[in-house]
Image (cartoon, rainbow, N blue to C red):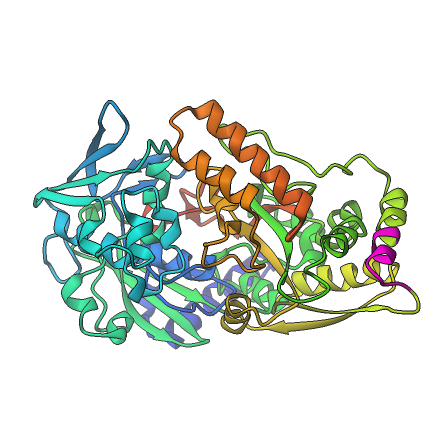
Amino acid sequence: MDRFSHSCARGIFATLVFACLIGITPAAAESVLRIANIYEPESLDPHKVTDPANINITRNLFEGLVVLDPKGNIAPGVAESWSVSEDGLTYRFKLRSNARWSNGDPVTAGDFVFSLRRVEDPKTLSQQAEDLYPIKNAEEVNTGKLDVTALGVAAPDERTVEITLKAPTPYLLQLLVEEQAMPVHEKTVRLGEDWVKPGKMVSNGAYVLEDWKPYSHIRLVKNPNYWNAGKVAIDGVVFDPTDNLATVLKRYRAGEFDIIIHGLPNDQLGWLKQNMPNELHIAPFAAVAFYVFNTTRPPFNDQRVRQALAMAIDREVLVEKVTRGGELPAYGFVPDGIADYISQKVSWAKMSQADREAAAIKLMSEAGYGPRKPLNVRLSHVTSETRKQVAIATAAMWKKLGVNVEIVNTELRVNSANLRQGNFEVGLIGNGGFDYNDARAGLSQWQTSTKDNWPRFSNPDYDGLMNAASVTGDQSKRAELLERAEQVLLREMPILPIYFNVARNLVSTRVKGWEDNLLNITYVKDLSLQK
């Protein structure tokens, strides 16, 4: 047997063994897509998930009024069409007559009214409720000032959803793609928290949840009641949460995975570029890696300390020597390519690294830190080889300022809880910011009232600019206000941008229909497998 034949046989054998282990018969194995998802999901409730590890799954279980096509453009979902009033304040969506839940119930306009109210209901504790604040009375409902029935969403009839806004919102359709705008089945949700478990979940997307073994796999199967089930080519999907990147890559090469989503070891990128160029997908991605400071804890409540730590990081070294995947140094928070926006930069972006370090040492001295009084920092990150390497490199750069760094890594759930509860000093966010193609997607998180405002940043100038941008109907004025807000953010530095990410995916050549896009969003329903 030649080397090629041996490799193929090994891949087929691994596929069959893997399929049997997760309960899929060999006959059906060819129609099963296997995805390395890197992290164990926190939840599969679309109104409570926040991390891409969760959203990769929920977007295949649930479908909103609109979706994205493979190129990342808005496309019809449950709504077959929509219209907008002349003043831009009212959107009317006409639902498909054949939209069904996985149990056969029709998907109605009332389902969307219930679901949007559920997201804004403070009892739900949705971390993404603020994204829908452009809807009339959404903020007042979410903060307990008004009853959920006051939310600007209505169902004039079973197939019409009407959404009323407090001000023109040109990016509303982008918001409605997101998980917080996905419908949930009211009768099922009212059964209690267990509704997200296999055998109990009722969903309306192209797939349904069949099995979930924590830290082992999540298995979805095709939903026969999905409105476009006849066009869904893949029968099943298995998401694996293994977070050891080296192990994941070995398993991919052995034929156990078809796709690795944004989880490739840095030290293997060069080899992958040379040996697997048709499978390696490195593409522009609307995301930024950054540190977040807990501004409620000294000395991180001192802007001088935050700026000094920001200036001491050599971003060019990070992207060239550490991440090595085509990332770009970040001297601002909003990446290039975001619609209708000019990305901003820190005032010292053009300084040499030597001059930045000298200025940083001076700032630290002014803040009371130096060789005789070193600053001790606890730097935390999600368990990940890439983030570990970035943290180690950062610690070495901060050492020049006399800063001692303790690096702590935790699993996704623990890290997320620590950020929300303020149980951290400095946290590394490796892939954050932009769930939809608008600058507000990242900038709104740092407003005083936002639940996921991890640094507890509170600045009246910033809040004022963001609030003004949210109510103006003038697109150029809105962009100007958002750009000024980013300037405030970069001056105060509650978060410290280090590099702009690229999407780094490995996709088998047997997977057809994959297209890179700015948000790195792909629905399994748009893919097929070559036998």
Q: Is residue 183 visible?
A: no
Left or right placement of residue 37 versus residue 496 in this view: left
Q: Position of residue 77 (x, y in %)?
A: 25, 42
User: Which residue lies most toward the right here?
Assistant: 372
363 magenta-colored: yes
- Name the side, left or right, on which 448 lies relative to 79: right
Magenta-highlighted residues: 362-370
Question: Between 316 and 175, which is closer to the camera in this rendering?
Answer: 175
Query: 237 and 423: which one is in front?
Result: 423
Image quadrant where residue 173 sits: top left
State the image quarter where residue 252 is shown. Answer: bottom right
**In what quadrant of the picture does the N terminus appear?**
bottom right
Q: Locate residue 359 relative to residue 505 in the image: left or right.
A: right
Q: Is residue 298 above or below residue 63?
A: below
- Residue positioned most to the left: 157
Res 292 seen here: yes
- Vertical comparison of 438 with 64: above or below: above
